[in-house]
Image: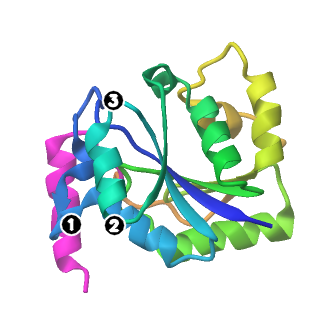
Amino acid sequence: MNTVAIIQARMNSTRLPDKVLMDIKGKPMLQHIVDRARASNVDNVVVATIKSSHQIITYCKNNNIFYHDQDDIAQLDLLTRFIESGRKYTADIIVRLWGDSPLIRTEDINFALDAHNIFKPDYTFHNRGAGVFTFGKLIKWNVMYGGQDRENFHALMLNDLDVTHRVGQSLPFKGSVDTMEDLEFIRGIYELLP
């Protein structure tokens, strides 16, 4: 079974543009997430982006990071972005990671994967920001959620309690970056890390 971590990232975030390549403790936010995913039990790590995110594409090329870029229409269609990235890298199991959530730990990714393999739900979600599902389920959801909010398919899946298994403790604070204040807070946390 080929397990692929897919990190969704684009430069044109409406709340804080360019955030995924902003510096945290000497390297871009995206690199921290890539490093933690690479240290986990996945087989490959891929950045799923859009063609207008030239800086991300260039960064991935320059740093030997697999990536898949789609036409900009896919920026609001994450389902398609994940399907195409999963297909390109022949994923059997997908670990979904967010490019603006740099506090995800390698242990969290492995815990979510282990729980998914043991309990075999349609979707396993680690409360610190990792989702695990099969490529086959992704194709099924593509049909199920055809006309719905394809940018936020995570929320659609979490609302389907019959197929979701939650694991792990949530952070006692916000772990994603949407504003400069969020970024400064997380930079402060990284300064405390070894």
Q: Is residue 154 left or right of residue 35?
A: right
Residue drawn 39% across and 32% down?
51
Q: Amino acid at mark 2?
A: His
Quick one: 40 or 101, which is closer to the camera? 40
Quick one: 163 or 172, which is closer to the camera? 163
Residue 52: image tag: 3
Q: 158 above or below 173?
A: above
Residue drawn 72% across and 54% down?
90
**Most frequent secondary structure within the magenta stretch:** helix
Q: 185 above or below 70?
A: below
Q: CA distance from mark 2 to mark 3?
A: 22 Å
Q: Are marks 2 and 3 in contact (CB under 8 Å)?
A: no
Q: Is residue 103 left or right of residue 132?
A: left
- Residue 187 percent coordinates (x, y): 17, 63
Q: CA distance from mark 1 to mark 2?
A: 7 Å
Residue 32: image tag: 2
Image quadrant holding the N terminus, namely bottom right
Residue drawn 69% across and 13% down?
147
